[in-house]
């Protein structure tokens, strides 16, 4: 049977891995290539690289780092950040990315997902969405969680899946960085709305949060986290063993 | 030297890198002379069967691959490249494949329970059903990475491994010197690299 995936996320800026708490207060962790190798040999099922650079030089550096990673890491790589056109898809796919994640780019150009899915297949197009409750409604936030688009999240996700998004990374701004567990209520609403794989993000603070996630929401396919892995608070092999012990299928 | 057949589908960076990781030189080429000179061939592929089969024929490389495989040169098809080895696919219509392995490509929706997601995406365990040199470095239950919505059917004689996704889906096939993996060895970590290493050690028949 298919296993539940554990995915470390690497936010890369100016060639270094960073991770913010609620997207603020970035702090340097390690070299992206070394960290990627560490995770791959340490049992990660997949890696997500987000390019959070704004400058052209930073983008070039990111692309070089991606190529170097794909030369030495042989698990699926999802790449996001700054993906606004199909040319951006080409740029990262040529460096060994398997899937490309779009967020603000799809909000700015809602035809991007459809165009990319037609060119590269649904399995290649990942919708990444930052969700936050505003007056009790799930809203889509853009620009790294800084800007409320006003769009209702579930209908936006549905629309993107209809256009060809083959997988979702759903990040809760409300729980991100808080380390008090995943946003089960919001994720349940997403799982009910779509049938593509869902990667849960935001809020993991310990191993039990992953157990709670997969037990409560069997339709969630993967759990994504950054700082708890980067700072060694949770070891992926230990987490996989713990999942197996709790009856959750894990690749070991 | 390994030649990866480049007929204009998908990105082959990872595949080429994965051979480098097992210490074997691989070239990505659309040149028939290079394919003929190579020790082994790898047929990759992503996307839709009909489109890929057409591109392979239009490039003139379908005949080269068939001839070289017919001469006993080891050939490994990966993902859609594995599916192309078969007689026929029923993915959005009916399309001819290379006919190097007997069987047909059918939707996994035909055989799996309705509550399972399609595509079959993620890490699944291999059940090794037949002895094969390709698996000499891996073990029963090892995990590999899949992404597919169609599977190889009507090919019992060729199946060397299956994976359980509500039904046993064909994971790998072999017919003499012709091998195919539905999963992506180049994305399956150390297990995938071990399979590629075993393929690299195959001799022509």
Image (cartoon, rainbow, N blue to C red):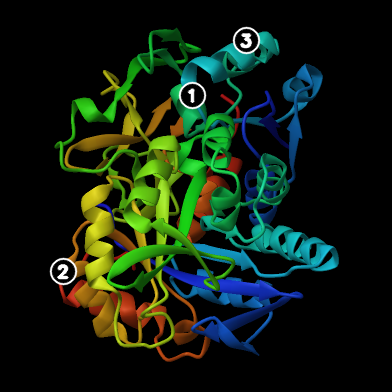
Residue B139 seen in the current view: no
User: What is the distance, in whole Å, between disc 1 and disc 2 at their CAs?
Assistant: 36 Å
Image quadrant where one finds the C terminus of chain B: top right
Marks 1 and 2 on same chain:
no
- Could you say where residue B196 lies in the image, as x and y percent from the top left? 55, 46
Question: Which residue corresponds to the image point at 38% horizontal and 15% vertical from the top-left?
Answer: B92
Report in which chain the residue with disc 2 lies: A
Disc 1 versus disc 2: nearer the observer: 2
Chain identifier of the residue bearing label 1 in the image: B
The residues bearing labels 3 and 2 have C-alpha atoms spaced at a distance of 49 Å
Q: Which residue is mark 1?
A: B48
Quadrant including the N terminus of chain B? top right
**What residue do we see at 47% from left, 34% from top?**
B79
- Disc tally is 3
Identify residue for label 3: B57
Residue that numbered label 2 is attached to: A216
Seen in the picture, residue A133 relative to B75 is either above or below; the reply is below
Using the rendered image of the protein, determine whether residue B154 is visible from the camera's viewpoint.
yes
């Amino acid at each position: 049977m298919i296993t539940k995936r554990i995915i470390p996320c690497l936010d890369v800026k100016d060639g270094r891995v960073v991770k913010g708490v609620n997207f603020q207060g970035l702090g340097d962790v390690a070299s992206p290539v070394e960290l990627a190798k560490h995770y791959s040999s340490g049992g990660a099922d997949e890696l997500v690289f987000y390019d959070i650079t704004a400058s052209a030089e930073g983008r070039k550096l990111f692309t070089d780092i991606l190529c170097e990673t794909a030369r030495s890491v042989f698990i699926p790589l999802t790449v996001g950040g700054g993906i606004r056109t199909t040319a951006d898809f080409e740029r990262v796919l040529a460096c060994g990315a398997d899937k490309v994640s779009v967020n603000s780019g799809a909000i700015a150009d809602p035809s991007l997902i459809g165009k990319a899915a037609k060119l590269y297949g649904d399995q290649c197009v990942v919708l990444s969405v930052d969700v936050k409750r505003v007056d009790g409604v799930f809203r889509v936030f853009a620009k790294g969680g800084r800007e409320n688009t006003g769009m209702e999240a579930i209908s936006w996700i549905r629309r993107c899946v209809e256009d060809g998004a083959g997988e979702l990374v759903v990040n809760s701004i409300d729980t991100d960085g808080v380390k008090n567990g995943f946003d089960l209520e919001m994720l349940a609403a997403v799982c009910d709305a779509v049938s593509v794989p869902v990667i849960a993000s935001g809020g993991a603070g310990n191993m039990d949060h992953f157990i709670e996630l997969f037990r409560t929401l069997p339709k969630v396919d993967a759990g994504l986290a950054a700082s708890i892995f980067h700072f060694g608070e949770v070891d992926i092999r230990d987490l996989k063993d713990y999942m197996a012990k709790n009856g959750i299928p894990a690749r070991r | 030297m390994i030649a990866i057949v480049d007929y204009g589908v998908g990105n082959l960076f990872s595949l080429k890198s994965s051979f480098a990781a097992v210490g074997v030189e691989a070239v990505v080429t659309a040149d028939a002379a290079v394919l003929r000179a190579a020790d082994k061939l790898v047929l990759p592929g992503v996307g839709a069967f009909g489109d890929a089969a057409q591109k392979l024929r239009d490039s003139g490389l379908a005949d080269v691959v068939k001839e070289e495989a017919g001469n006993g040169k080891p050939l490994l098809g990966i993902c859609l490249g594995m599916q192309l080895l078969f007689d026929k696919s029923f993915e959005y219509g009916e399309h001819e494949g290379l006919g190097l392995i007997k069987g047909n490509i059918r939707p996994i929706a035909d055989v799996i329970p309705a509550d399972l997601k399609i595509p079959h995406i993620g890490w699944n365990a291999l059940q090794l059903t037949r002895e094969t040199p390709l698996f000499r470095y891996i073990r029963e239950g090892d995990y590999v990475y899949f992404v597919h919505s169609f599977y190889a059917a009507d090919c019992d004689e060729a199946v060397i491994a299956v994976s359980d996704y509500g039904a046993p889906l064909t994971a790998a096939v072999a017919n003499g010197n012709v091998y195919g993996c539905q999963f992506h060895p180049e994305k399956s970590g150390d297990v995938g690299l071990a399979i590629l290493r075993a393929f690299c050690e195959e001799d022509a028949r």
